[in-house]
Image (spheres, rainbow, N blue to C red):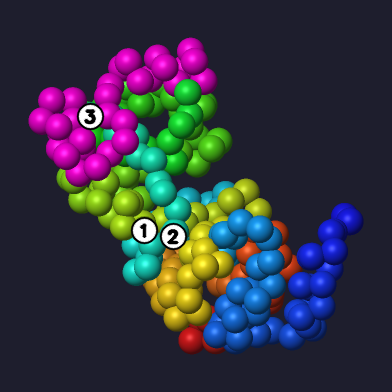
Amino acid sequence: MKHGKRYTEAAKAVDRSVLYDAADAIALVKKTAVAKFDETIEVHLRTGCDGRHADQQVRGAVVLPHGTGKVIRILVFAKGAKADEALAAGANYVGAEELVAKIQHEGWLDFDVVVATPDMMGVVGRLGRILGPKGLMPNPKAGTVTMDVTKAVKDIKAGKIEYRLDKSNIIHAPVGKASFTEEQLADNFQTLIDAVNKAKPATLKGTYIKSAVITSTMGPGVKLNTVKLMA
């Protein structure tokens, strides 16, 4: 893969043979985020889990103390008083069957997170083939299937992110923007790592986090010392 001049210059600052401590890695990632827009800073954790087994799934959600830096559009499936609650809490879109039809027939996907009350999951289930592959399906473990729609919406607006294994047993999660201070990124990073460590499957044998990289949207990856992450 051919990279541009900016990336090539930025990559010179990163020693690929070194496993960096979190603070040094964050400083490097900020330094090498040289795109003309405010890049997202992401963490990628390769685990020793086998997500094909139910007892080795890793999935959850955590509120980052400084948010993600991104404006999140929230869709809530609810009716009656719960729909009113969701709107009052700041949800961008609230509805029921009519929104299912809009997504199915118009391909409407102008939202980032979907929340649903439990009684609506029968209706939302029809969207499994559309929302599932995009990681948008509401899930109780992530706190997005709940009767407390006010808390769900406010937590997401405050910076709640979901983490889970992909098909390669890797966790991908944002921890902020390049414009954040090193301290803000470090706080968010540690909050995510603490949550992932708590979610370690009891049945897992061997190493939990095999490798870890922190990177900006357009910048080079910086490898992290995983021994310190699991301390």
Write the residue at 41% across / 56% down.
161
Decide: marks 3, 1 in contact (CB < 8 A)? no
Helix, strand or loop at label 1? It is loop
Numbered range of the magenta stretch? 79-107
Q: Is residue 160 in view?
A: yes
Q: Is residue 81 magenta?
A: yes
Q: Nearer the viewer, residue 168 or 221?
A: 221
Write the residue at 59% across / 60% down.
39
Helix, strand or loop at label 2? It is loop
Helix, strand or loop at label 3? It is loop
Q: Earlier in the sequence, mark 2 or mark 1?
A: 2
Question: What is the number of the mark on residue 159?
Answer: 1
- Binning the other alpha carbons within 10 Å of mark 1 as few (below 14), some (14 to 19) or many (20 upward) gives many
Q: Residue 116 location, x and y as percent?
A: 29, 35
Q: Amino acid at mark 1?
A: Gly
Q: Residue 67 location, x and y as percent?
A: 38, 62
Q: Amino acid at mark 2?
A: Thr
Residue position marked by numbered label 2 in the rendering: 68
Q: Is residue 57 in view?
A: no
Q: Quadrant of the N terminus?
A: bottom right
Residue position marked by numbered label 3 in the rendering: 78
Q: Amino acid at mark 3?
A: Ala
- Binning the other alpha carbons within 10 Å of mark 2 as few (below 14), some (14 to 19) or many (20 upward) gives many
Write the residue at 25% across / 51% down.
154
Q: Residue 122 location, x and y as percent?
A: 31, 24
Vertical side of 140 occupied by 185: above or below: below
In the visual, does 27 lie left or right of 218?
Answer: left
Please identify, in this view, whether the residue under mark 3 or under mark 1 is nearer the observer: 1
Identify the image quadrant of residue 118. Answer: top left
